[in-house]
Structure formats: structure tokens, C-alpha cells
Image (cartoon, helix red, strand yellow):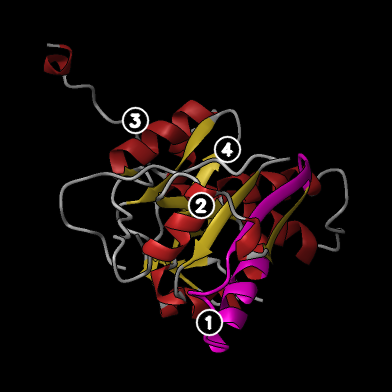
Amino acid sequence: MAIVGKEAISALRDATKESGGNGERSTFTALKSGSTFLVKALPLENIAAYDSYGIFKKVNSFEAENPSIKNARGFATDELTPWDLASKYYQDQVSDLIEAGKNKEDADVKPLRTKASDYRSKRKYIVPFIDLEAGEVIYIDFTKNQAESVISVIEKYEEKGRLETTPLELSKTGQKTDTKVSLTATFEEDLSETAAKNFKELTAENVTVNFEGLTFVANEKAQIESLIASGFDVSLIDLAAPETDPTEAF
């Protein structure tokens, strides 16, 4: 994971627990539209951030084994990954056209901007919660905007010293790009017997937060292969398709 704890929160604001070590791998819990989880929030130090690459329905999301250096706006500036180079390939064309007097919404500019965005990394945030019905830690993957709203609520209750004493409802509504995530307080007396028991017994001190296994980490070879799978000609950025090891099939 690229950034964990308070550094992740600082990165979030600039832009607008360590792994368990027991060999176990965690998985994300899907927060689907229309769903609600009864949760107990964990302190902000348990939040992680990472830079995600991928193209919807073309290339599954991943993080780079060796992340590039980003500026405050999230743009790669040094030690670029193959996907950063692909994004730069299109962004450089956009910059040249804009410099020549074109508008960013012009028909020959907008598709290039879309391509540059497709290959650019997006900062994502992983927020763990205690699922009160299941009695276990769950991991939710948030976009920057979603994380801002959720983290502000956690911060408010943490500052007031009420994080351990306030059960919360985590919900998602809407469809496609028009979705909204909310984290709101609920009443302890309204919890089911199971949820109330877990609320009392499970705390930040006696659960383990383990980010291991949540994201797929791709090395340079895998990143180049995924660029090719997306339809990008890697020779445009002076890269070549990785050679196939004939023994890998055996």
C-alpha cells in the first residue's frame, strides 16, 4: 500500500495499521448502490491510500510495483510507469494543440484528453470498518470524493472522543456516476442483538487491520502486457512487448 494512516489523510487534503503480518490476505467488501452496513469506525490511522490504474471493462485495476512520483495534483512527474508514459503520450498531444490555439473541448482535442485520463492513475482510499452484523473487519474502496465525505465524519467523532461509542450506518445510493456515499450515526438501542454484542466487544484495540492482498500489484512486465491488452501500441513510448517464456506453460 502506497500510503497508510495520517499521511493518507494529508494526501487527501492536499489534493482538495500496518499489515497484520500473519500471512493472511484480505479482500474488499463491495459497497453496492442501495446497500447499507452497520459499522463501527476505526481511528484515522487505519486508512490507506494507493494509486490505481485500469480501464473499466478493459483492464482490471492495479497499483504499480514501483509507483511514480506525483505532484500535488496527482500527475506523475518522475520515475514514470509504463501507464504514466502512455498517459503522457496523449497529454503531450493535448498540450501541443492547446498551445496552438485549440480549445480543450474541440473535437480533435477531447478524445486525446479522454485517452490521457484513461491511462492516468487515480488516487483511491481504503477505509476499514468493523461490520457489526458479521463481527469482522471489512475493507471498502473509495474514490477521492467518496473518501472525503466518509473521513470527515470519522474525524468528527474521533475528535469528540465518540468513535468507540457511536454505531454508524454506511450507505450508498444512486446509479453509475451519480452515486452518493454516506456515513451517519444510528442508535445503539436499535441494533440487533448480534450487532449490539459485536459493538460492545470489538474495538480498535482487539481487531487486526491487514491490507495484504487487497490490491493487485503489477510489475513493469505486467503493466506493459496490460497496456497491450487495452489496445495501446507500446512502441509509441519506446517499449516492446515482453518476450514469452516457453516454459511458463509447463
Name the kind of residue labelled 2 in the image.
Answer: Ala
| On screen, residue 186 above or below 243 | below
Residue 238 included in the magenta stretch of the image? no
Asked which secondary structure carries label 3, the reply is loop
Asked which secondary structure carries label 2, the reply is helix
For residue 179, which numbered disc appears in the image?
A: none
Q: CA distance from mark 2 to mark 4?
A: 38 Å
- 232 or 33, nearer to the observer: 33
The span shown in magenta is: 149-178
Q: CA distance from mark 4 to mark 1?
A: 36 Å
Q: Nearer the viewer, mark 2 or mark 3?
A: 2
For residue 158, which numbered disc appears in the image?
A: 1
Q: Quadrant of residue 175?
A: top right
Query: Which residue reaches farthest top?
Result: 250
Which of pointers 2 and 3 lies earlier in the amino acid sequence? Answer: 2
Name the kind of residue labelled 4 in the image.
Answer: Ile
| On screen, residue 155 above or below 105 | below
Q: Residue at x 32, y 60 (%)?
A: 209
| Contact, mark 1 vs mark 3 (Cβ under 8 Å) | no
Residue 169 placed where, x, y %?
Answer: 64, 57
Task: Report whether 158 appears left or right of 103.
Answer: left
What residue is disc 2 on? 195
- Crowd rating for badge 1 (residues with CA inside 10 Å; few <14, some 14–19, many 20+): some
For residue 241, which numbered disc appears in the image?
A: 3
Q: Nearer the viewer, mark 3 or mark 4?
A: 4
Residue 154 included in the magenta stretch of the image? yes
What residue is disc 4 on? 55
Name the kind of residue labelled 3 in the image.
Answer: Ala
